[in-house]
Every structure is written in C-alpha cells, then in structure tokens.
Image (cartoon, rainbow, N blue to C red):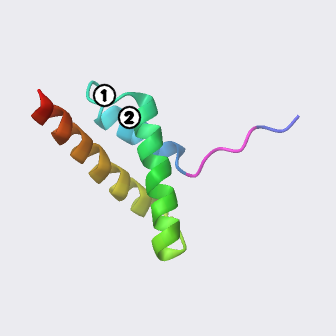
C-alpha cells in the first residue's frame, strides 16, 4: 500500500495555521491556500509554494482586518 501524496502546500498551510492561530480556523487557512494556489495558476501559469504562501498570508491579513472592523 502506498502512502498518500503530500500536498506541495502542506508546509505552507502548517506555517500559516501556526501564524494565524487564534485568529482563523484551520479550514479558513486551507481555503485561503487553495484560493491562492488557483489564483497564481490562473495569473502566472505556475503556483510556486512561496508565491502561494505570500498570497494566502495577504488574504488572511485582510480577513483579520475585516473581522476586527466588524467588532
């Protein structure tokens, strides 16, 4: 039996979950990483993990800002 394939973004998700712990749920982080992946593919044709991480981090910062403004 073979091991399941590890997402190339597993480390990105893990780092962002740690960074945004207490601010965003793990599922929100996963959704932002997935959205960043697809956005990078659409715009550049390639989704390097470093680019995906930067895009997802910006999304998570914006979501945190919106949440804090709502009070």
Magenta-colored stretch includes residue 45: no
The magenta segment is 4-8
Magenta-colored stretch includes residue 6: yes
Viewer-side residue, 36 vs 2: 36
Dot 2 corresponds to which residue? Answer: 17
Task: Estimate the x, y position of residue 13 in percent, counting from the top left.
Answer: 45, 41
Viewer-side residue, 22 vs 12: 22
**Residue at the extreme right of the image, as rendered:** 1
In which quadrant of the rendered view does residue 54 lie?
Answer: bottom left
Q: Quadrant of the N terminus?
A: top right
In which quadrant of the rendered view does residue 29 lie?
Answer: top left
Residue at 23% x, 47% y is: 62
Q: Quadrant of the C terminus?
A: top left
Label 1: how many Cα within 10 Å (few below 14, some 14–19, many 20+):
few
Label 2: how many Cα within 10 Å (few below 14, some 14–19, many 20+):
some
Q: 5 left or right of 34?
A: right
Q: Are marks 1 and 2 in contact (CB under 8 Å)?
A: yes
Does 45 sit above or below residue 22?
Answer: below
Does 10 sit above or below residue 49?
Answer: above
Residue at 43% x, 58% y is: 52
Residue at 14% x, 31% y is: 70
Give residue 21's mark: 1
Q: CA distance from mark 1 to mark 2?
A: 6 Å
Which secondary structure, mark 2? helix
In which quadrant of the rendered view does residue 51 lie?
Answer: bottom left
């Amino acid at each position: 039996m073979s091991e399941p394939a590890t997402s190339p973004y597993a480390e990105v998700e893990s780092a962002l979950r740690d960074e945004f712990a207490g601010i965003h749920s793990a599922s929100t982080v996963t959704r932002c990483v997935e959205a960043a992946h697809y956005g990078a593919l659409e715009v550049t044709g390639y989704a390097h993990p470093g680019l995906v991480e930067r895009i997802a981090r910006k999304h998570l910062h914006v979501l945190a800002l919106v949440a804090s403004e709502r009070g």
